[in-house]
Each structure stands twice: as C-alpha cells, then as structure tokens.
Image (spheres, helix red, strand yellow):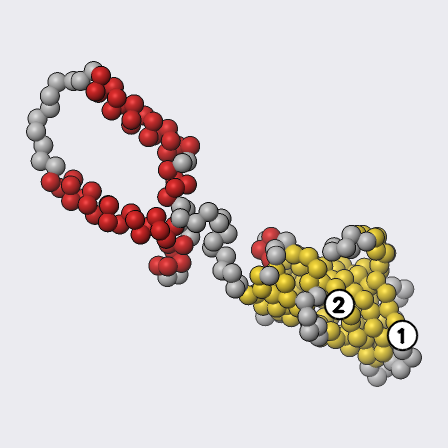
Amino acid sequence: MNLQTIITQLTSPFKILLDFVSLIVNTIFRGLIIWKSLFPTRELPKINFSGVRIINMIFLIIIPPLFIGCNNDDDTVHVPENKQVTLKITGKGTVLGQTKTFPHPKTGETIEALCFLMDLIDSETGNIIGTLQDCVVESIYYGDGTYTSKVITSINIDGRGSIQSESEVLHTMQPPVPDFKTIVFTTTCTPTKNNIVDTTFEFENMEGTVSLDGEVKIGLGKDIVAYNNNFTINMKKN
C-alpha cells in the first residue's frame, strides 16, 4: 500500500475536530485557560520554549497538506471508482428441485420457478465458499437436442455479499452415457451486456456479466439434477 493510498484513507481532520470526544477535550482546555485568567496562580519559573517553538513550526508545516489530502466527505473514498472484480466459481451438487415463488430482484414481478440450491466452490482452491441457487423460470425446447432456459442465479459468497444474474442458458444434449438412463447437457451462456440484476455488500452497485460453461445431468429421478457449472463473473462499479 503506497503513501497516497494511506493518506486518502485517513479520516478528515475536520471530522476529528468535530468529534464528540474532541469537542469535550477542547471545551475543558479552553475552560482551564479562562479559569487561569480569572484566578491566576503564583508566577512559575521562566522556561525556555525554543524547542516547543520548533515543534510548533514543524506541526504547522505538516498539517496543511494533510487537510488538503484528507478533506473528503465521501465515506467510500477507499473504494476506487474503477474497481473491477473477476471471480471464477463453480456450482456443484446433485440437487432436488423445489418450486418457489419470489419477486423478481429488479422489477418486483412475482415469479414462480423450479429452484436448485447447491454448494458454491472456489474454482482455484476447491473450497466451499457459499451457496448458489439456479431458478429456472421457463424453458423453450427446439426438438433438435437443444433448449434454452431463462434462469435467475443467486450467488452468495460467505462474508462478502451476493450477486444475482438473469441469463438465457443454452442446453445441448450430449451422446448417451453408458447406463442409457441419464442424459447429459452442456450448459453455456456468454452475455455481451450487463446481466447482473442485484448485488449486496462488497459487490453493491456493481454491474457486469455472469457467464457460464458447464454441464447438467438429468434422469436421476423426478426434478433431480446433477450440476457442474463453471461461472466467470466480471464486474465493476457502475
């Protein structure tokens, strides 16, 4: 962390001077000065204050730049305006779907969808870092082994915040697996514009894309799906 970053993160001196404790200390100090002027004590021995004067001069030289550098009332000054975030995560698990009704995160419209809740995994470390929920709002089948689904994905990262995206996912059927009971579909989504509809905490007020490249396996039972979906999230402050 460089000196400029440290300085920009300092609390404004004006805020320090107007702090409740600072006001009390200043009031007591000024009160003592007034008390001394009204009820002077015996004269004390003369003291050479040349060293104190030098310290005062240094103090007066240093303070103005700090006032200029720190006088900013924006409490989010520590967040760069061009902050960018890239996340690589995986939603994985064999999940029983549940029908849920919830408001659309952006429009407030009531939605009914089949939702699948699974573990959220850091693609680099393999550690579980939260949960991911895919809610399939509707699907369109084309009869050639492909179909598209409108999906609202809720990504919750422990200790950091949440990201919700709305995507059109293409499913493409793969050759049958040896047991001839399950069917594997590749899943892809490559948005070219913002498809993030809601963010919280660390990711608040960020926009960007949530892309997908993975696969799902069906035929394991009614509404049971095995997920192995890799997501790449690119976001920045809007």
The percent position of residue 114, horizontal first and vertical second, equals 84, 60
| Residue positioned 39% across, 50% down in the render | 70
What residue occupies the far top of the structure in this picture?
Answer: 39
Q: In the drawing, does residue 6 fall left or right of residue 169?
A: left
Structural distance between the alpha carbons of marks 2 and 1: 16 Å
The percent position of residue 158, horizontal first and vertical second, equals 62, 55
Q: Amino acid at mark 1?
A: Tyr
Q: Amino acid at mark 2?
A: Ser
Q: Pick the residue in front: 68 or 41.
A: 68
Q: Secondary structure at mark 1?
A: strand
Q: In the drawing, does residue 98 fall left or right of residue 154?
A: right
Name the residue that disc number 1 marks. 141
Q: Secondary structure at mark 2?
A: strand
| Residue positioned 71% across, 75% down in the render | 190
| Residue positioned 61% across, 57% down in the render | 205
As drawn, 187 above or below 111 = below
